Image (cartoon, rainbow, N blue to C red):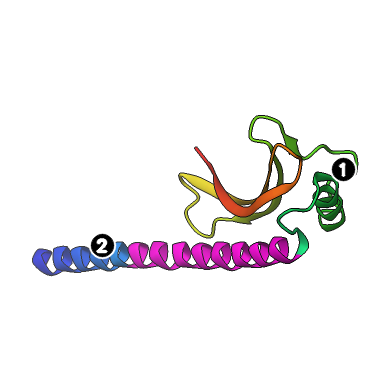
Amino acid sequence: MIRRALWAVALGLGVLIVSLFTWDAVTRQITSNRLRDRTAYWTAAVGSGVRVGETREEAERWLRKTFRTQPSNRDFYDEYNHSLVVPAETIAVVGVTFPCAAWMILVDIKLGADGRVTSRTVKTSGACV
């Protein structure tokens, strides 16, 4: 009788552990898919909205038009990297939020010495412990 009870508890714990690992894998995949899809969206948007070779003012105008929720007087310029940087979107982590609770998608438009766009990238950064 005690053996059966121990086997039932062991079986229950095994099912619970396998379920937790499966749930974690599924929720990680959901987050990964959302991040991939939204990064692809912003890459296409930036690629069609900002051309290599255009001026800083033209790029800033596109950023202000695209990110209307940002303060209109905000300076996007990062003087240390000679780029225009704006947080495009935040993707909340589905499931376990340790060590990262969310991922931020950032638009980074590099400028040359002449103040013209040299490259445009969309990157991600985790909001992690």
Side of 122 relative to 57 (left or right): left
Crowd class of label 1 (few under 14; some 14 to 19; many from 20; radius 10 Å): few
Image spot of residue 96 (x, y percent): 47, 54
The range drawn in magenta is: 19-48
Cβ atoms at labels 1 and 2 below 8 Å apart: no
Say if 59 sits above or below 2 in the image: above
Q: Nearer the viewer, residue 20 or 54?
A: 54
Q: Nearer the viewer, residue 6 or 14?
A: 14
Q: Secondary structure at mark 2?
A: helix
Q: Secondary structure at mark 1?
A: loop
Say whether disc 1 or disc 2 marks the residue closer to the N-terminus: 2
Q: Going 58% across and 52% down the picture, which residue do you hit?
A: 123
Q: Going 50% across and 46% down the picture, which residue do you hit?
A: 100
> Residue 71 — which label?
1
Q: Which residue is mark 2?
A: 13
Crowd class of label 2 (few under 14; some 14 to 19; many from 20; radius 10 Å): few
